[in-house]
Amino acid sequence: MLYWFSIFNNFEGTLMIRLMIAITCAALVNGFANAEHYPNWRETVPIPVYEKEPGYVELYWKAWELAQKKIKTQPNLPQSPYMDEALKDHTIWIWDTTFMVLFCKYAPDVCPGVESLNNFYVPLLDNNIAPASYPLNIRHPDNPPLFSWAEYDNYKFTDDTAHIDKLINETQYLQKHFEWFDNVQPGWQFESNAEQIKISAKTELKKVEYGYYWGATPSGMDNTPRKRDGLWVDAISQQALSALYISRLSREVGRQDEADKWQAQYDELKNIINTYYWDEEDGFYYDIDASNFVPLKVKTPASFWPLLAEVSSQQQAKRMLEYVLDPNTFGGDRPWVSVARNDPSFSVPDGNYWQGGIWLPTAYMATKAIEKYGYRKEADETAEKLLSHMLRTYKTYLPHTIWESYSPTRDTPAKHEGLVVREDFCGWSALGPISLFIENILGFHTIDAQKNIVQWRLDNQSKHGIKRLKFGATETDILYDGDHEIKVKSNKAYTLVVNDVALKIKPGEQGFPVTVNNGIPSISTTNGSGGVGEIALMMLLLAGWLRRYY
């Protein structure tokens, strides 16, 4: 390598040639390749169509381009190539990687999302890695326990029962990590053989009777104003989420005994969260003082983890929604700020990282959380405001890219201690231009390979849809022409539900007539092209529910 740098330093060629050599040398030094792993990735990922705002499509392709450049290789790993968080070579984060799975599912052939989780499972949970021999540093081993959520979400897309069977019955990584999270003690460190930082940060997590002590950095919210000496509502809620999905995945592979065990664990955590962390006066989940259970009243998106974990009642979720829509807390034209706007620590104008900055992982989580309680309209509206903010920043702020986090008050990236946050962050920021765009703007809010169903909220009169959407073994194009017809092409049969009307999709090409009333497209329940109506839809959903739980 020094030989090549010597040639470079004495080279008399053009600046362009020097630049090309520098890029090549840098790639070799870092030990990873970028888009060359999958040079034809553009021929694989889904193709969005959205004539109402072509800028969203441009941002979508930019996100995939950046994500491809962050794929790395490293010898002697359980999984290589792997998705990188776009931060540091030779260091990986659980927090980042689990969120990346949630957009990688749309292009599994060119983005090894769920596979990258093996780079945490094996060194942390298998107990067969020699000390200080692992080539990557796991920076914060006590990062949020989101493996079960990522695995469950990916499973719905792939219907890969063999993978889940191995995960639940053989390796038992999800169960082991739940226990690991409960038992790790403060001060533990993971030792690696990474080229840069060899020892992880010290763990700060500690389980007590009614929850977990934690810290800002391991929680993922680095400089959050939340109190260090309290019990953290996100930690216990994320463990509840894990137990819930371990239970559901166990049912999928016929382990009713395991499902019952983890359902009981979930029920216990759910009761604790609603008993101690819910503040009836404010209608909000808070961190609590461990000595007297008094709420520590700092409002952040972390309080929406109980909703994602399905801990809340419908009435509790309704009260939480008020804060989502309130421009003085999390709402406004730039929603999902990382601390409420009316909190004394809210930093104007640029958020100072987790003191007001807008972060795609927590925004995505909270959007999916309110969707679970039927607030899809509100989820779509906040998603579009956030994506619009990202697009305006992309167009007006140099360089034209996607950022680690965003300002809560203007169309710029956020700042941290006066410095602009990291650029080209895809990484988890791809959740906006990819996942929120497909799910909440294009409207494909449910894609379930296990039930063989796609649910599409068709609510704007412009040409839009998606091509080359893949779930399970199905590949399909779904396109509304903006006038009178939905056109569908598929290699396999499945059910497409458009605004609660179920359509039987057959292999080949089909068209479905659309009528428009007051600018809103709708489809007949009795059209001649395969509509099966609401009763049939209920039967389909019931069949899927029975298969999932019995």
Image: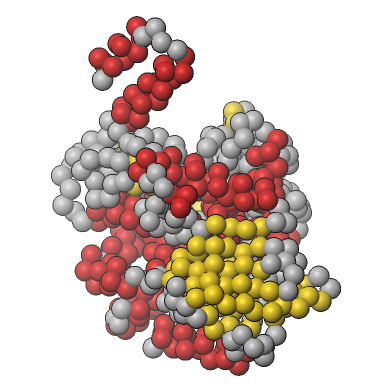
Q: Position of residue 11 (x, y in %)?
A: 36, 9
Q: Position of residue 488 (x, y in %)?
A: 57, 73
> Could you tell whether 525 is left or right of 3 in the image?
right
- On the image, which quarter does residue 513 sit in? bottom right
Q: Position of residue 250 (x, y in %)?
A: 33, 76
- On the image, which quarter does residue 49 sit in? bottom right
- The extreme right residue here reads 518
> Could you tell whether 381 is left or right of 206 in the image?
right
> Could you tell whether 472 is left or right of 313 in the image?
left
Residue at 67%, 33% (x, y): give it.
Answer: 397
Q: Is residue 179 visible?
A: no
Q: Is residue 419 visible?
A: yes
Total labels: the figure holds 0
Q: Nearer the viewer, residue 173 or 19?
A: 19
Image height check: is 184 above or below 85?
Answer: below
Q: Nearer the viewer, residue 495 or 331?
A: 495
Image quadrant in which the N terminus is located: top left
Residue at 28%, 71% (x, y): give it.
Answer: 162
